[in-house]
Amino acid sequence: MTNYVDGKSKVKNESFLPDDYTPAEDEPFMNDRQVEYFRRKLHNWKAELLAGSRDTIEALQDGTRNIPDVNDRASEETDRALELRTRDRARKLVGKIDAALRRIDEGEFGYCSVTGEPISLKRLDARPIATMSLEAQEKHERREKVHRDD
């Protein structure tokens, strides 16, 4: 059975995936269990980020108060600015998570966008939004560094 969340991404409601499942190198790459594992991982990560954003918005709305001490006010404004930067990074991360979920739906998830080769399961487990294999990513970063230094 397939359910739609937010009218956009599909979430398979599968019972064949045990809660303690982790992808293994000795099984076929991006089989149904691995795909469902990463789909769930991405949806859970996105839900955590969105919950954090809601908490931040509520805290900012509730936290608007007049603080007479200049130092305390400056400290609170610095904390707010830091929290807003953190939430902006989370917002960008949600976009990358959505892109990874689209790649799952399109059958492209787990494969390097440069070489087309499978991305290691260890890398995907650590960073499920990865679009390049470790080797391709390192090569890309070296090229960026060379061009940045020019």
Image: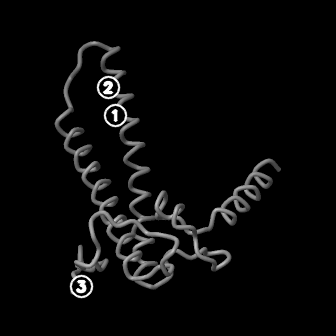
Residue 53 horizontal side relative to residue 139, left or right: left
Residue drawn at x 48%, y 78% as measured from the top left: 27
* CB under 8 Å between discs 2 and 3: no
* CB under 8 Å between discs 1 and 2: yes
Q: Quadrant of residue 2?
A: bottom left
Where's residue 60, x and y in %?
24, 38
Q: CA distance from mark 1 to mark 2?
A: 6 Å
The residue beneath circle 1 is 80
Residue drawn at x 44%, y 57% as measured from the top left: 92
Labelled disc at residue 4: none
The residue beneath circle 3 is 2
Q: CA distance from mark 2 to mark 3?
A: 45 Å
Kind of residue sitting beneath label 2: Glu
Task: Look at the numbered disc 2 and give the secondary structure of its residue.
Answer: helix
Task: Look at the numbered disc 1 and give the secondary structure of its residue.
Answer: helix
Residue drawn at x 39%, y 28% as measured from the top left: 78
- Front of the two marks 2 and 3: 3
- Front of the two marks 3 and 1: 3
Residue neighbourhood size for the residue with mark 2, other residues' Cα within 10 Å, grouped as few (<14), some (14–19), many (≥20) = some
Query: From the image, which quarter does the N terminus lie in?
Result: bottom left
Labelled disc at residue 76: 2
Q: CA distance from mark 3 to mark 1?
A: 40 Å
Q: Is residue 149 above or below residue 64?
A: below
